Image (cartoon, coloured by chain):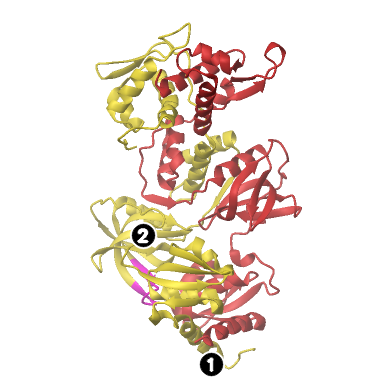
Chain colours: A yellow, B red
Amino acid sequence: MSARRGPRPTAERLRRLLVMLPWLMERGEVPVAEMAERFGLTEAQLVSDIELVSMCGLPPYLDELIDVWIDEGMVSTGVPRVFTKPLRLTAPEGFALLAAARVAMQLPGAEADGPLARALEKLAAALGDVVVVDQPQPPATADITAAADRGARLRVTYWSATADGASERVITPRRVFLDRGRWYVIADDHRSGEERTFRIDRIEQWTPTGEVDEPRAVAAPAADEWFLDDDLRTARLELPASAAWVVERYPVRAVEHAGTRLVVELAVTDERWLRELLLRLGSEAAVLSPDEWRHLGADTAATLLARYEGAGNDAS
Amino acid sequence: MADALERITNLVALLLETRSPLTLEQIANELRGQYPAGDAALRGAFERDKAMLREIGVPIDSEVLAGSDAGKTAYRIDRRRYELAELELADDERRALQMAVAAARLSDGNFGLLKLGADGNASSTVVANVPDDAALPVLREAAAQHAEVGFGYRGRARTLQPYAVLLRDGTWYVIGHDLEHVSVRTYRVDRIEGDVTIGDAGAFERPADFDVRAVFPSDPKLLGDEPASRAVVRVDAPRANWVVGAMGEGAVQRTYADGSVEVEVPCANLDAFRSWLFGLGAHAEVVAPPEVRAAVVAWLREMAVAR
């Protein structure tokens, strides 16, 4: 955890104290630096909190309610009276732990009877077994993740939506992430020499080349962050109320209400993606701008229609 | 006057230590000089302290006294409800949880880890962006305690006996018995309007045979009531591998010499079916049944004439 600077709210300090004190009491004596690092505080912040609680007291134990002191870089505690056990988990903490464990059980590499499964069983027994996560992985996910752990190069056949065709590439996977129900891998793409993000469900074939690259840390983007690139183009769409799911499903830059209809600004990664979206939305949706995309939906529909009508066995 | 942190730490210790509940006057007397003088100022400061304790999850019991102090409220903290239940996690289990929290990046998880004796410093090659929603902890708690919840949804008040919360395709759902519809219903958590209210624990029993996955099938194309439940779709060679990989060989009805295939696809939910179909662009065509094919043609035609 990283330490924050500046004044800290009392609630935040107390929340931490109620966890730090029992932890300290279990150990008796801990270096200031280690304790500060663990609890995400600067050493000065930790020292000021410890000095403050050492003055706490209730009659008749005025100065010895919480028997803690700092000496020569060590935090020490005497015989504990109160705060021997941490405060129970709050509802948000309990939920976050349970959900994280459930999600992680569906990540590549989780073992059905491994330590996480055992931890989850204990958590679920204490907090109720009521969180279910159903997040299937595309077939390549486990191998890609294993390659990312080792920096192993893979030769992959990748379906590119932009090119509308499969291509062969050599990539070094760096980080695998799940966003909005889809799996992605950030990888070094040796064809372009750049870092690229690939959708794992579009990787059709994959084999190790046998080469291994130096490890390189790549941060995973936060939700939505990677759609907020200023280089991406923006399309303004007018939608019926029934298409409000677009706002939840895709990162939108702005939403306005026009009567019962919505006007949204969407970041467009590539034109083919917009075409697919327009097909799903149907005739009730309209592109307002840019001009070159105004007829994209109609033109795309006409192209697909030609396939049905040209076949000569159209039932309608 | 003492620092607010010192006072509130003393307050927690006092309420944990006391054998019988204490009135505000008794509390102020024990913590002499730490609360401001004057009834209104004292009451105000104490209420702020209580609100802060509630915010960080300290459970304070209150009761209205009888006898000589009749009508006064007295307070204490029940140690059994205050203290973390011992989970007896082994070291490797704690580390596994640490990795899980690092992967799922739910912000409250790190603090939960500290309470369990693990620290939040871990990293993971795999990361999942799991949507967070303020209603989720309440819904989880209610489902675990068998308490009814109330919330607004599409402009109407609902009352639900929640059985479980489910994350699927990046969206959280709550599933339970809806008291108004008298049937099991599924609601999207991100569409819940306003706060969720929670009733008393033990208000209902969850059916022993309840299975989320059976109630709510994972393939949205199965979730619907269109008359035709399956369609046959011809997929061209460039996407055939992918479709067969995703649906399994069992879905393949015919393979053509040019590498294209005919697959059987659920279409009980026509919206979900269209999404899937149009995701294949011009590489897919509905072959049968005629009414599904006609519906797709009509959809495209309406779009094309808008030019």
Which residue is at a point 36% across and 31% down the rendered structure image?
A: A39
Which one is nearer the viewer's eye here, A100 or A258?
A258
Main SS, magenta region, reads: strand
**What's the residue type where badge 1 is placed?**
Gly
Identify the magenta region.
A156-167
- Whether residue A142 is visible to the viewer of this picture, yes or no, is no
Residue A205 in the image: x percent, y percent?
A: 39, 67
Nearest to N terminus: mark 1 or mark 2: 2
Residue placed under numbered mark 1 in the picture: A310
For label 2, the SS is: helix
Which residue is at a point 71% across and 36% down the rendered structure image?
A: B202
Q: Chain of mark 2?
A: A
Residue placed under numbered mark 2 in the picture: A226
- Label 1 or label 2, whichever lies nearer to me, is 2
Q: Residue furthest top?
A: A60
Quadrant of the drawing holding the N terminus of chain B: top left
Q: Is residue A166 magenta?
A: yes
